[in-house]
Amino acid sequence: MVEKNINALIVKFLSYKRSLGYVYDTQERYLKHYQKHMEKNFPCLLIPDKVSTDSFLNLFQGQSGGLYNIMASLREFSRYLLQIGYSEVYIIPPKQSPKLHPEPPFFFSEKEISLFFQTCDLFAKERSISPIRSLAIPAEFKLLYCCGLRPKEARELLVKNVHITEKYIDIMQSKGPKSRRIYIHDELVSFLLLYNRAMNEFLPDRIYFFPKDTKKPYSKGAIYYNFALIWRRAFPDWQNKLPRLYDFRHHFAWANINQWAREKTDINIMLPYLMRYMGHNCIKHTLYYFRFVPDFYSDYKNLSQKLNDLLPEVPYE
């Protein structure tokens, strides 16, 4: 059956992707935005062509991250249309996507980590304005720090996927149809049991583990706002650029690798475990999070010196 409008094609595409196990919520937002642009500016056009596509992409010039994701969604949509028989569809060339330059991570010191979570504990006791927020937000930050999750993974974590007494959490379909199970240590188990008991007094039938209300989690913007709020409370004289919530994930990766190096544990053996825990497909993606930081310089020097001793000196002639 030939569809008569762009909306019907997008609906079929999303249904197809979800039948394969993909969540595709973010991509749906991009495609719905594209649909509105098409209906307003190209009402007679059924499938993407170069002119309409370039017109839409021009709205996002200067936003490299957003533009990259939008182009990826549109390219996948066009490939689907080609597969079902729309041979004239325009597909964005692969090399047209902007090259992303990730922002360098912020390296938390132990003192900064300690003070931040002390401030989180104080925030958790502020029940007068919003008892749910004061409980959920600090607990979510602590889980991010302890387990190196992506912020979205913690924000959208369902109650049914948190098995506290069994000491594990199921992360479902974080990137594509991939899911994983992560195990948590006893200290975090004790904390989550107390948090869950307190939250159940307010929202016993909640869907999300860190809820805004019974049926919804906090938005991405709300989580980042509260992170900045607590950070500024912890460091009122802070003049530098604020850390990002995602930097907890960087911290988790390099802190583990640095600790293994100090303990003389074989990092090559441990990396596959870290890779699976963080939800990566290959070790290269895990190593992306590793950076040498000042705390590790002395250990790295000692390790490299031992390797240097294995190399014979070369005489000068």
Image (spheres, grey):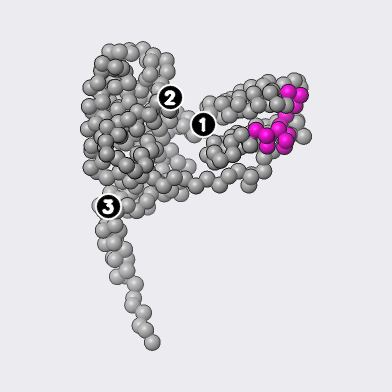
Tell me which label, 2 or 3, sits earlier in the chain.
Answer: 2
Pointer 3: what residue? 295
> Which residue shows up at 69% across the image and 23% down it?
39
Q: Is residue 201 above or below residue 275?
A: above
Total of numbered circles in the picture? 3
Pointer 2: what residue? 219
Q: Amino acid at mark 1?
A: Pro
Residue contact between numbered discs 2 and 1, judged by CB atoms under 8 Å: no
Residue contact between numbered discs 1 and 3, judged by CB atoms under 8 Å: no
- Give the percent coordinates (x, y) of residue 213: 38, 15
Foreground: disc 2 or disc 1: 2
Tell me which label, 2 or 1, sits earlier in the chain.
Answer: 1
Furthest-bottom residue in this view: 317
> Which residue shows up at 65% across the image and 33% down it?
56
In this picture, residue 197 sits left or right of residue 49: left
Distance from label 2 to label 1 (Cα)? 22 Å
Distance from label 2 to label 3 (Cα)? 35 Å
- Give the percent coordinates (x, y) of residue 305: 29, 66
Crowding near pointer 1: few (<14 within 10 Å), some, many (20+)? some
Q: Quadrant of the C terminus?
A: bottom left
Pointer 1: what residue? 177
User: What mark, if any, has residue 235 been given in the picture?
Assistant: none
